[in-house]
Amino acid sequence: MLIRNIWAVGRNYADHAKELGNDVPTSPMIFLKAGSCATVNSNEIVLPWWVQDVHHEVELALKFSQFMTVVEAAVALDLTERKLQNELKAKGHPWTLAKSFSDACPVSPFFSFKNFDDFRDRKIRLTVNDEVRQEGRTSQMIFGFEKLIEHVKMHFPVCGGDLLLTGTPAGVGPLRDGDTVKAEFEGEITHLWKVRQEKPPQPPTTP
C-alpha cells in the first residue's frame, strides 16, 4: 500500500526535547514528511550529495490500514539535515528541505502490532558502527499510542498506508558516508543499513 504521508511527532521524549534546547510540549506536535521519502526494507541509505549534517532519529513507526486502524509497525529513521533545519528555523522559514529529501525516512520490514498493551514498555535502540547512540523505552513517550493516533486522525487527512512516527529518544547525532546503522525494536525487529552519500554532479565538459 502506497505511503502518501508520514505524520511525525516532535519532542515526544522529554530528554530529546531538552538535548535540542526545546520546551516539552503539552499536546502532540506534528510535522509532515513526504511519503515519497520513505524507503521500506532497503539495506542502504543514500544521502543526497548536497547535505552536510544529517542526523539520525530512530523511531517506532505505526502504519495505518485501509480501515484507519493500526495493525502493523516498523522501526524507522527520521533523518534530519540539522544544519539546514537550524538555519531555516532561525529565519522563520519552513524546514521541509531538512526533513523530506530523498531517502529521509528509511523503514524496516513491518511486524504485527495489534495489541498495544504488548508494546507499552519496549526498548528502542540505534547503534552506528557498533556504538550505541540512542536508547529509550516506549514507556517514556509523553503521548502514548492511542493519544497520537486519535490526534492525527482528528486533525489531518490520514490515508491508508500512511505512517505515524512516534518520536525519538535522546542521543541524536550525525551520519557519515560509510557508516553502518543498526536499529532495534525489542523483541520484534533488528534492521541494518549502510550509509552512502552521492557524489556531487560533475560540471559539463566543454568541447
Image: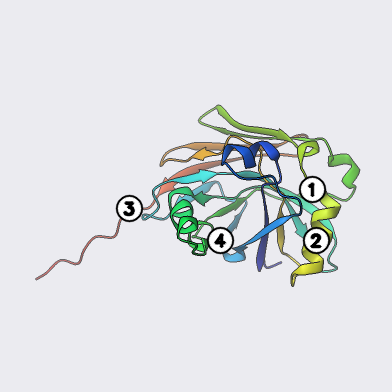
The numbered mark, 1 or 3, whose residue comes first in the sequence reads 1
Amino acid type of the residue that numbered disc 1 sits on in the rendered structure: Phe
The CA distance from mark 1 to mark 2 is 10 Å
The numbered mark, 3 or 4, whose residue comes first in the sequence reads 4
Q: Is residue 145 above or below residue 31?
A: above
- Disc 3 marks which residue? 199
- Residue 123 lies left or right of residue 169; in this view the side is right
Find residue 25 and report its horizontal and vertical position in percent: 71, 49
For this rendering, which residue is in front, 174 or 95?
Answer: 95
Find residue 85 and report its horizontal and vertical position in percent: 48, 54
Q: Is residue 24 above or below residue 3?
A: above
The residue depicted at 47 percent of the width and 44 percent of the height is: 195
Badge 2 crowding class, 10 Å Cα cut-off, few under 14, some 14 to 19, many 20 or more, is some
Where is residue 104, by image quadrant? bottom right
Where is residue 171, by image quadrant? top right
Amino acid type of the residue that numbered disc 3 sits on in the rendered structure: Lys
Residue at the outermost left position:
207
The CA distance from mark 3 to mark 4 is 19 Å
The numbered mark, 2 or 4, whose residue comes first in the sequence reads 4
- Residue 95 lies left or right of residue 22; in this view the side is left
Say whether marks 1 and 2 touch (CB < 8 Å). Answer: yes
Amino acid type of the residue that numbered disc 2 sits on in the rendered structure: His
The numbered mark, 2 or 3, whose residue comes first in the sequence reads 2
Find residue 138 and report its horizontal and vertical position in percent: 77, 39
- Disc 2 marks which residue? 151
Badge 1 crowding class, 10 Å Cα cut-off, few under 14, some 14 to 19, many 20 or more, is many
- Disc 4 marks which residue? 37
